[in-house]
Amino acid sequence: MGGAARPADGQGGPAATGRGRLAGKVAIVTGAAHGIGRASVVLFAREGARVAAVDRDAEGLRRTVDEASGDGPVLPVVADLGRAEDPERAVAEAAARFGGVDVLFHNAGVMPEGNALTHAEADWDRAMDVNLKAIFRLARAAVPHMVVRGGGSIVTTASVMALRGHRDRLAYVASKHGVVGVTLALAADHAHQGIRANTICPGTIDTPMLHRVLDALPEAERPAARAGFAALHPLGTIGRPEDVAYAALYLASDEARFVTGAVLPVDGGYTSLIV
Ligand SMILES: NC(=O)c1ccc[n+]([C@@H]2O[C@H](COP(=O)([O-])OP(=O)(O)OC[C@H]3O[C@@H](n4cnc5c(N)ncnc54)[C@H](O)[C@@H]3O)[C@@H](O)[C@H]2O)c1
């Protein structure tokens, strides 16, 4: 484990040119302006990758680039991944700047609230486009680059809500179950090209997505709500963005060269027991 990445052996990327677990690799990370995506950009850059950091939030991306500065080139790409043309453009910009693509980490996501009676159609469509369809569009653009490299790694962020149901998250639950499905299908379709595809199912993670849920509550109720989230996880805490970023790092790296089609909970044991 650790140390410099091996030369290309069907796992993508040229021979290592520097130090780190992703040395020599080009990675695309989406949802890079906040939370899990930001932590992943910082970690991937520290581990030697050249990183295209993709998000619709230009100001947030600037802070991500600042945080990663000194650890290798990070290219900010402002893109709305719910729009038809933006995923392909993001991949093209990454490939043009860095000369190829080895790793695609689709992590951007939105979590509208609603059920069959209350969801606006626009919320359903947005969740499907950003959380799910963007993977199809990004993969369509990135896989040919990975084939040229002799392989690659696709990592997606699903959720514990990709493994279970949840009240008032109809579109989110549906889209995240789809994330698992499309990742397994990508793993099956592209294994013969040396391309691996795996998905991570985070439990509750301390990011702006959680903060928005808490902020919707009266201020006096927030500490108890936060403690309630922590109590759902057998390890007794909510996760940090880095907890997910480290899982993505492993799956992106050649250390996971024999791992594809994996559905990995990073959830403090949340889905391991019946409450
Ligand atoms: N935080 C949690 O508790 C939790 C739990 C399970 C799964 N997840 C998943 O983890 C991923 C990252 O979430 P997070 O917690 O870091 O959330 P976050 O809201 O903190 O960050 C999400 C990022 O995605 C970006 N984004 C949203 N829509 C976009 C679009 N159309 N185009 C480009 N960028 C877009 C946002 O600007 C933001 O930077 C998401 O897929 C989320 O569903 C989060």
Image (cartoon, rainbow, N blue to C red):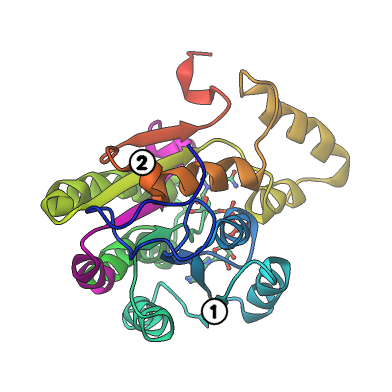
Under tag 1, what secondary structure?
Answer: strand
In this orientation, which residue lies closer to the viewer: 270 or 173? 270
Residue that badge 2 annotates? 256
What range of the chain is rendered magenta?
Answer: 141-168
| Image quarter of residue 145 | bottom left
**Residue 116, visible in the rendered structure:** no
Left or right of 251 in this view: 270: right
In screen coordinates, is 150 left or right of 12? left
The residue carrying pointer 2 sits among few (fewer than 14), some (14 to 19) or many (20 or more) residues within 10 Å by Cα, namely some
- Taking the image as shown, residue 225 lies to the left or right of residue 274, namely right
Q: Residue at x 43, y 85 (%)?
A: 97
**52 relative to 254, above or below:** below
Q: Local crowd at mark 1 within 10 Å, few (<14), some, or many (≥20)? A: some
Q: Nearer the viewer, residue 126 or 55?
A: 55
Q: Amino acid at mark 2?
A: Ala
Q: Where is residue 78? Give x, y as percent.
A: 52, 81
* Residue 144 belongs to the span the image colors magenta: yes
Q: CA separation, marks 1 and 2?
A: 25 Å
Q: Quadrant of residue 130?
A: bottom left
Q: Looking at the image, tell me whether mark 1 or mark 2 is earlier in sequence order.
A: 1
Q: Could you tell me residue 9's position as x and y percent? A: 24, 53
Q: Disc count in the image?
A: 2
Residue on which the image places disc 1: 75
Query: Residue at left 40%, top 84%?
Result: 93
- The amino acid type found where label 1 is placed reads Leu
As drawn, which residue projects farthest toward the top? 274
Q: Is 89 a magenta residue? A: no
The x, y position of residue 12, in whole percent, is 29, 59
Secondary structure of the residue carrying tag 2 is helix
Q: Using the image as rendered, state which of residue 225 and residue 122 is in the foreground.
A: 225
Give the residue drawn at x 21%, y 47%. 187
